[in-house]
Amino acid sequence: MEQLGIPELTSEQVEELSLIAEEAARKQILSKIPSKNIETLNISAETEGTKPVALNVEVDIVLVRSMKDFDVQKLADDAVKEAFASAEQFLRELTCRLRK
């Protein structure tokens, strides 16, 4: 994300970035699996630094037994990808707003 040329983020922007990433991952998972089939869902999105900012997204998901043949790893990987895509979009929009 360093090549986006983003300015140093405020603490509020860093917090918003984490929330956006976490929400995007959750939405991605819930768009594929009904919540009744999820036994455990933990998503953490943590940022380090303000410039450059580093984002770490972790998804821990356990499905109910009846979903044992479902590819949980792919579901988690797709959620992480969506979290990063949403975070990048937020940073691009932020950069555009600040340049005006």
Image: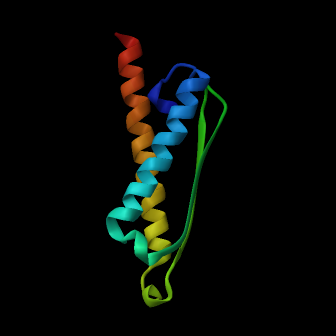
Quadrant location of residue 29? bottom left
Residue 99 higher or lower than 27, as above or below: above
Pick out the residue farthest to the right.
49
- Dividing the picture into quadrants, the one containing residue 30 is bottom left
Q: Most extreme residue toward the top, as rendered?
A: 100
Give how far across and how far down residue 44 sits, in percent.
59, 52
Question: Camera-side residue: 1 or 36?
Answer: 36
Outermost residue to the front = 36
Q: Tell me what residue is drawn at x 48 percent, y 24 percent.
A: 5
Residue 8, compared with residue 33, is above or below; it is: above
Could you tell me which quadrant the C terminus lies in? top left
Q: Nearer the viewer, residue 88 or 5?
A: 88
Q: Is residue 99 left or right of residue 61?
A: left
Query: How was this image coloured?
Result: rainbow
Counting from the top left corner in percent of width and height, residue 24 is at: 41, 50
Q: Eyeballing the image, is 2 above or below 26?
A: above
The residue that appears at 43% across and 69% down in the rendered structure is 75
Q: Is residue 28 left or right of residue 72?
A: left
Q: Is residue 27 left or right of residue 52?
A: left
Number of numbered discs: 0
Q: Would residue 55 be found to the left or right of residue 83 on screen?
A: right
Residue 54: % across, % down: 61, 39
Task: Tell me which residue sits at (48%, 31%) in the image.
Answer: 3
Q: Nearer the viewer, residue 40 or 15?
A: 40
- Return the x and y of residue 21 as percentages of the image width and height: 48, 45
In this view of the protein, which residue sits in the foreground, 93 or 15? Answer: 15
Q: Is residue 10 above or below residue 75?
A: above
